[in-house]
Amino acid sequence: MRVTLHVWRQPGPELAGVFVRYDMTDVSPDMSFLEMLDVLNQQLLARQDDPIAFDHDCREGICGACGMVINGRPHGPRRATTTCQLHMRSFPDGAELWIEPWRARAFPVIKDLVVDRGAFDRIIQAGGFITARTGSAPEANSLLVPKADADLAMDAAACIGCGACVAACPNASAMLFVAAKVSHLGLLPQGQPERAARVVGMVAQMDAEGFGACSNHGECMAACPKEISIDFIARLNRDYLKAVVSHPSSVVRGDGGSNG
Amino acid sequence: MAVTGVILFLFVVAHLLGNLKIFEGPAAFDAYAEGLRTVGAPFFGRGWLLWIARVVLIVAVLAHMWAAIETTRASWRARPVSYRRLEPVETTYAARTMRWGGVLIVVYVIYHLLDFTFGRVNPSFVPGDVYHNVVASLRVGPVAAAYIAAMVVLGLHLYHGTWSALQTLGLNRPPTGGWRRGVAAAIAVLIAGAYISIPVAVLAGMLR
């Protein structure tokens, strides 16, 4: 099949970017989207051009490294699919594809389609963990977790931190990511002691990173390759309000309180 | 944003219930308008509770606008380089028009106050004769049309606002996921429709 690509090429963080057109022929419908870009990069290298920089790692849809906006949709047109798991058969022959990086102040472009998602790491560092050593997996019946809570925690823990939620949000808000990370620990017994400090610290860091304000469009949920529900955003808001009421000092300090 | 939104939502409902008394005739409607000033007597003096409500509403409106401007500016700052295009999937027309809808509602409220509270743009304003003022204004075709259009805008704003406020306040829970948007839409249609019934009734000659 044939495709026409318009790829965002930006040589460096402070440099201006432009769309560059590439006409591809002999694309196999069974190629993944990234394999198609690999083929293009081989052609670019063969003619001494700079290959297109893009993030990728596992190519199994579970690491969260890859991601680009394809025709206005983060990770492309298929629901619940990362860019690496998207196949060229998802597009019609002769398709015209506009490929852009995630666009957010908090995700500065490093090169071409690669963005710096260090903001997510710093949000995790602000409380997205359990301080105490929990050791290896405990004996199953020593710490009881209701099945419904375990399932919900698992749904939230499915977040791979790819950043598609931020990319899809009209406000470039990171609420779905933070909600998933706050919820998967907040639903489990091990997460309870630091629950209030966690949510306050992570939200403060999210704001400090310059993400936008959630206005409940729901685009994040539609773009999420793991289909994480915006119900977790309601849960995040609930946890945050409770934390503000019960631990007001941690809000003033903005450092996540007890573990700060 | 959500807290002030809830206050304003409650006002919209209370105002609607009061307005619908117009269908009970001039005497009942004017008595209701007078009742707003005497309610709470003898503990409160004439108009006290009305002014307390007005102050609460003015503060709520200003806080709501401030929150809207702050979140909008934060969002604009958050994406300095925009996409060539971003395809909407999940969002609604109501959600995308919240900001302009809010501006239109402010413009409408100013006109509405000039029309019925200050009487400046009312064709024949008679202080205290509320029924007469309403009918005199809404009998004018373009004015009635503007009121109806404003209520459609309000309905869209309420549709996104209702379920969005519950989301922000953390009250949305998974079991209601399937129907809460439908309920929000039904509430919005009910409120906007009930408001629109008044100019329609005036135009149809039911209220004269």
Image (spheres, rainbow, N blue to C red):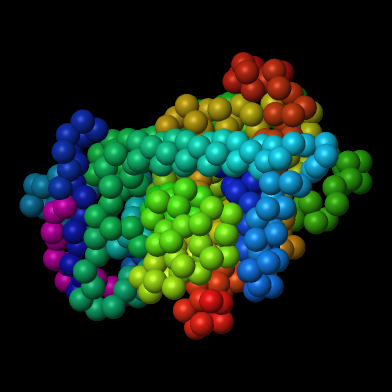
Q: Residue at x 18, y 46 (%)?
A: A9
Q: Position of residue A255 (x, y in %)?
A: 60, 19
Q: Residue at x 13, y 59 (%)?
A: A21
**Is residue A51 one of those drawn in magenta?**
no
Q: Is residue A246 visible?
A: yes
Q: Quadrant of the N terminus of chain A?
A: bottom left
Q: Position of residue B83 (x, y in %)?
A: 28, 51
Q: Residue at x 77, y 37 (%)?
A: B44
Q: Is residue B88 left or right of residue A242?
A: left
Residue furthest to the left: A47
Q: Give above or below for A119 relative to B104.
A: above
Q: Position of residue B101 (x, y in %)?
A: 42, 56
Q: Give above or below for B176 relative to B103.
A: below
Q: Give above or below for A259 relative to B162.
A: above
Q: Is residue A40 left or right of residue B180?
A: left
**Is residue A27 one of those drawn in magenta?**
yes
Q: Is residue A219 visible?
A: no
Count of numbered marks = 0
Q: Is residue A228 left or right of residue A213?
A: right
Q: Nearer the viewer, residue A179 or B130?
A: B130
Q: Is residue B118 left or right of residue B193?
A: left
Q: Nearer the viewer, residue B199 or B86?
A: B199
Q: Quadrant of residue B177?
A: bottom right
Q: Residue at x 46, y 67 (%)?
A: B136
Q: Give above or below for B48 relative to B25.
A: above
Q: Which residues are magenta?
A: A19-29
Q: Position of residue B7 (x, y in %)?
A: 64, 46
Q: Quadrant of the C terminus of chain A?
A: top right
